[in-house]
Image (spheres, helix red, strand yellow):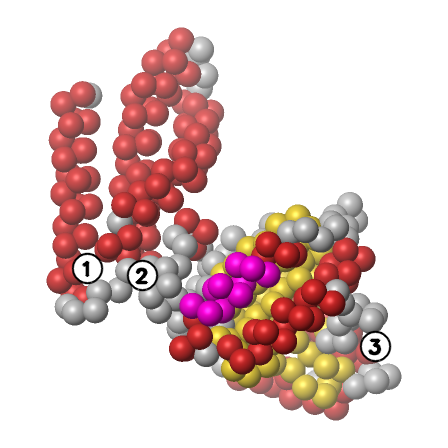
Amino acid sequence: MNDAASPEDTAVTIVTQTTVRPDSTDAFETWQTETSQIVATFPGFIKQTMLPPSPPAQDDWVILQRFEDSDCAVGWLRSPKRLERLKLVQPLLTGRADVHVVRGMSNVPAPSPVSAIISTRVKPGCEEAYRQWEQKAAVTQAAARGLQGYRFEPPIAGVQADWLTILRFDTQENLQAWLDSPVRKRILAEAADFTEEFHYRVARSGFDQWFPVTKEGAKPPAVWKQNMIVLLMLFPVVFLFGYLVQVPLLQRRLGIPFVFALLIGNIASVVLLNWLVPWTNKRFLWWLKLHPDDQRIHDAKGAALIAGTLILLAFVFWTMS
């Protein structure tokens, strides 16, 4: 289950995890927006992705900055402009910030709901013992419930002294169960003689790319609200594509078998949702944001509106079919 990078993938991703003071969220967002504009001008920059806090799974901000190769990434990390930006942001942060360089990672953020990024400092001269221990640990954790992927990254000379392990799980509960398990604690105890320290942080992903965080509290919308808005757009898209395109054109006129016509419909639906969900999200910002008074009534109003719209659409589509 080791997600090794392909030899052709020379790109690297800088993974930064940091915790922002509760009263400094707006200032941090402003700082990050300005920093994003600066890093975009650096040679080799490809893309930046931000994952805001999503308690209880993820308490910190995760920033993914992708570059064409290691030299370009290191150029940004060591640049005077970045160092100047770091001085400005320090008063807004609490605790230490973790910065890791990961080779490959062409698909970031990871498609799984939650990942643990584990950083380990190995004692000098114990690298081979640590490698052997890591191989044994990988075999043991492969049996962990919900494990979807595993990456192991050695240090990068002059850039990153820690050894990096990335575990991807299907749910926060399964990840936490593994982190707290007696089996894992026993494995870690076996590495005590050749490791100086290790710690981990959690990064969550899901529908977050469709639901930007508002400045009020810097928390993403509840998952059930995200799912309802996705369903609100998915239902009419699937029906109308099937009614207007899939059945009359793909299946009847072109003679494409149902399975392949359905696959084409699914692809089209995903593409359309990437446009429709953000558009709908803006119309439901009043509902997605936390309500200062009665949250339950506020949530019920939006849920009732979406449920009513779905029922109305179902009735209209029923009369068409």
Residue at the spot 46% in from the left edge and 69% down from the top edge: 27
Q: Of all residues shown, which one is farthest toward the right?
A: 125
**Nearest to viewer (mark 2 / mark 3):** 2
Mark closest to the chain's N terminus, 1 or 3:
3
Mostly what secondary structure, the magenta segment?
A: helix
Quadrant in the rendering for residue 125: bottom right
Mark closest to the chain's N terminus, 1 or 2:
2
* Residue bearing the label numbered 1: 299
Pointer 1 with pointer 2, Cβ within 8 A: yes
Separation of disc 2 and disc 3 at Cα?
45 Å
Separation of disc 1 and disc 3 at Cα?
55 Å
* Residue bearing the label numbered 2: 222
Give the crowd class for mark 3: few <14, some 14-19, many >=20 residues within 10 Å. few
* Residue bearing the label numbered 3: 128
- Residue 104 visible to the viewer: no
Residue at the spot 16% in from the left edge and 69% down from the top edge: 293
Can residue 121 be found in the magenta stretch?
no
Could you say where residue 170 lies in the image, as x and y percent from the top left? 47, 60
Report the amino acid beneath label 3. Answer: Glu
Label 1: which secondary element: helix
The front one of 169 and 270 is: 270
Give the crowd class for mark 1: few <14, some 14-19, many >=20 residues within 10 Å. some
The front one of 319 and 98 is: 98
Report the amino acid beneath label 1. Answer: Asp
Can residue 34 be found in the magenta stretch?
yes
